[in-house]
Amino acid sequence: GMPDYHDVVSDVVDLALLRQRAKGRHYADDAALRADVRRVATNSAAYHGPDSVYTTWANDLAARYDAGGVGPRHGERPRPIDVLRRLQ
């Protein structure tokens, strides 16, 4: 674990929470999911630093989501649960 994580990151969002929220239909729209995907990247940079492999991965995930590259077809906006299934 990372015992000091909550000292550094106040708005914790991770892939497990994204999955839970998507399965529970928490996201009312695409913008809400996009904000949480971006928050994963922001949190990683705050905790691990901007040059960390974790931050690089999180930024790549956010960029692929924004580009529609994690959806059912390139260029189409995926449903939140479809995005998270592709991340497993």
Image (cartoon, rainbow, N blue to C red):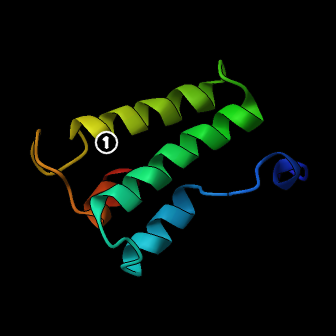
| Above-or-below relation of 27 to 73 | below
Q: Of helix, strand and loop, which one carries label 1?
A: helix
Residue at image point 29% right, 66% down: 29
Residue 44 lies left or right of residue 70; in this view the side is: right
| Above-or-below relation of 53 to 83 | above
- Residue toward you, 64 or 86: 64
Residue at image point 76% right, 37% down: 47
Q: Where is residue 22 in the image (x, y as percent from the top left)?
A: 39, 71
Residue 60 lies left or right of residue 46; in this view the side is: left
Q: In which quarter of the image is residue 41?
A: top right
Q: Image quadrant for the C terminus?
A: bottom left
Q: Position of residue 31 (x, y in %)?
A: 34, 56
| Above-or-below relation of 41 to 18 | above
Residue at image point 38% right, 51% down: 34
Q: Position of residue 24 (x, y in %)?
A: 41, 81
- Residue toward you, 15 or 31: 31
- Residue toward you, 62 or 87: 62
Q: Where is residue 53 in the image (x, y as percent from the top left)?
A: 61, 25
| Residue most extreme to the bottom | 24
Which residue is disc 1 drawn over? Answer: 65
Residue 68 lies left or right of residue 8; in this view the side is: left
Q: Residues within 10 Å of mark 1 (few under 14, many from 20)?
A: some
Residue 50 lies left or right of residue 39; in this view the side is: right
The type of residue carrying mark 1 is Tyr
| Above-or-below relation of 59 to 24 | above
Query: How many numbered dots are placed on residues in this image?
Result: 1
